[in-house]
Amino acid sequence: MKQKPSQHRLGDFLEGKGFYIILLLCVAAIGISGYYLYSGLTAQPEGFGDSAVVSGQAELPKPADQEPAPADQTDQSTAATTQGQDSKSDQTDPKTDQGKTPAAASPQQESVTPGPAATTGYVWPVEGEVDRDFSLEVFAYDDTMGDWRTHDGIDIAAELGTPVAACAKGTVSAVTTDDLMGTTVTIDHGKGMESVYANLSPSLNVQAGTEVDAGTVLGTVGTSAIAESASPSHLHFALREYGVTIDPGHYLH
């Protein structure tokens, strides 16, 4: 059988099944084009429609005449402000400071020579054993008075006529004759410290106002203390700090 030319075969194909194939392709093309068109219309830029709220303050452009001042000008303003505050603090209230002389200009700001300074240690006024201790808190029996009483010093055993020396540098502030403790010498050592020497012989080497050093002989051991006449021969020695009697044993060395 004689075959048809290719043009006739293509025409027969288009008139048959080919027509439906081409129609299907056209519908598919239209559907794809519509899909992309719809996607493009519904698509939103990134971040559009987010519920997040951006906080902050918008920075407005500064006017040309309000440009930041140069660093050196700022430093000068700060220095001027600080200087102004210092000058205010240095000013005094005329109501409260009226009639007062500034400390720097006061002619009384001169060093004052202190009196005799108290030493940290004192020498023994005589050599000997302590026959009776210092006791202000515990009562002790007194053989002479026959009762229980305190003792405001220490009794240092020593033979009659034994020299009694000053325990430290100072000034004799008083020479007295006590009814109970006999001939007594008191020395002011400064800083509130005083030393007391009782039961001395009436013959003394010092008087009130005499300047003494540690070891200066004041007199000799005697029997003038009636209140301690029953005790062996001794020197009654006491220390006072600002008028308060203290234990001499803590200071003698």
Image (spheres, helix red, strand yellow):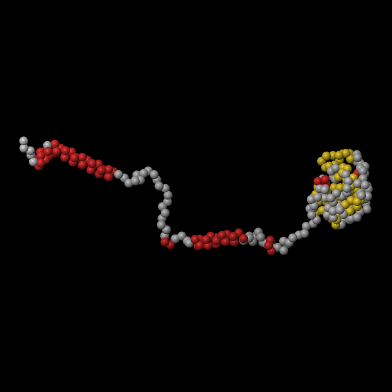
Indicate the quadrant where residue 145 lies. top right
| Residue at point 79%, 54% (across, down) | 117
| Place of residue 135 in the rendered image (x, y in percent of width and height, measured from the top left) | 83, 42
Indicate the quadrant where residue 150 lies. top right
Query: Residue 113 versus residue 22: which sits nearer the camera?
Result: 22
Left or right of 23, for residue 71? right
Query: Residue 178 versus residue 119: which sits nearer the camera?
Result: 119
| Residue at point 9%, 42% (across, down) | 7
| Place of residue 209 in the rendered image (x, y in percent of width and height, measured from the top left) | 86, 57
Q: Examine the rendering and report whether any part of residue 179 can be seen.
A: no
| Place of residue 25 in the rendered image (x, y in percent of width and height, measured from the top left) | 19, 40
Left or right of 130, for residue 95? left
**Total tally of numbered discs in the picture:** 0
Q: Quadrant of the N terminus?
A: top left
| Residue, far left | 1
Q: Examine the rendering and report whether any part of residue 191 can be seen.
A: yes
Left or right of 148, for residue 80? left
When the figure is inspected, residue 66 is found, relative to residue 183, above or below; the finding is below
| Place of residue 179 in the rendered image (x, y in percent of width and height, measured from the top left) | 91, 47
Query: Residue 79 versus residue 128: which sits nearer the camera?
Result: 128
| Residue at point 60%, 59% (across, down) | 89
| Residue, far front | 1
